Image (cartoon, helix red, strand yellow):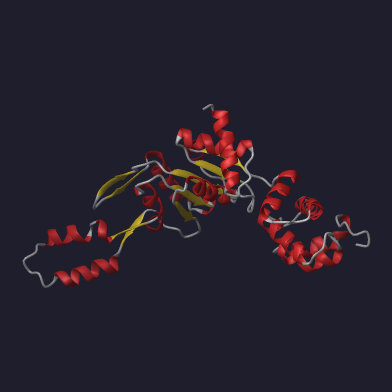
Amino acid sequence: MAASALIQELITGLGSVGYLADKPIASAVYFSQMLAKPLLIEGPAGTGKTELAKSVAALLQAPLIRLQCHEGLNESKVLYEWNYRKQLLWLQAAKGDEAREWASIEADIFGPAFLLERPLLRAISSPTQAVLLIDEVDRMEIELEALLLEVLSDYAISIPELGTVKAKTIPIVFLTSNVSRDLSEALKRRCLFLHLGYPALDREREIVKSRIAGVDAGLVERATLLVSSLRGLDLEKPPSIAETIDWIRALKILDTDQIDTAAVSDTINILLKNSRDIETVMKRLHEFSSDPKA
């Protein structure tokens, strides 16, 4: 089957698990799999980066292994660590067996039964192909980023006590970044790249309609238009796609098909999560509202 047909099939498949992908998104995922390269997805928070990885895992019925990056994340939480409590219990039990030599005991306590697999090792040692999601990689320390690059180059992890663990099947790897810092050029070269910004109006309306059953088309049109306008303001946290969906759900509960001052005032905390942003929007609501009295 031609690549273009397979990409279209991927678009359809992702749609079947609730992710509306366009051709650039599906193409990036397709070539990432064909070339066995990680896919680095950059863009603002709330544009569907994490959801894309989850949807690919759901479509392929593959295990999703997620590494959530944060400040202070260390090597042992990324690769592996030993179960020290279990090792201690084993040592205490072995005290009564004076005939056993230390070398034999050491071989036992540093065996697979005492190893705690963390996300990278779990993905590499998975018996079936896994989807590895490294979320918010830009929050990872630079030193740890170098370690990540080494692992993704060889898909192997060296454990001094056990040897080198090589991937049985190369995982499908997604890295997401909110662009809070620049990633190394070496890491970028190792990956394919996809930028996910806020969707165009038509696509966001399709997403909303796919997530909210029986929603009024007029309400969706007016609400997404307002959200698009708000994203053009100087907000600290522009509304994400998920927040747009939640907001329209709330408007639907209010049983309104208009975006008037009262409706916005009652629900603005669902759309915006920053007091300064809420104040900014409420002051300028008359510029965007569909209510002529606003």
Looking at the image, residue 247 sits to the left or right of residue 11; the answer is right
In the image: residue 221, left or right of residue 27: right
Residue drawn at x 63%, y 36% is 23
Residue ranking furthest to the right: 293
Left or right: 95 as drawn, with respect to 287: left
Give how far across and how far down residue 159 sits, in percent. 28, 50
| In the rendered image, the vertical position of residue 8 relative to residue 196, given as above or below | above
Report how many numbered discs are placed on residues in the image: 0
Residue 47 or 246: which is nearer the viewer?
246
- Residue at image coords 58%, 48%: 49
- What residue do we see at 54% from left, 29% from top? 3
In percent of width and height, residue 93 lies at 17, 71
Q: Nearer the viewer, residue 36 or 245?
A: 245
Q: Is residue 122 visible?
A: yes
Residue located 83% across and 59% down the image: 257
Where the C terminus falls, by quadrant? bottom right
Residue 95 on image: x %, y %: 13, 71
Name the residue nearer the viewer: 7 or 144: 7
- 15 to 291, vertically: above or below: above
Outermost residue, left side:
99
Q: Nearer the viewer, residue 294 or 136?
A: 294
Indicate the position of residue 292 as horizontal and vertical percent values: 93, 59
Extreme residue in the front direction: 214
Q: Quadrant of residue 249?
A: bottom right
Would residue 237 be visible to someone looking at this image? no
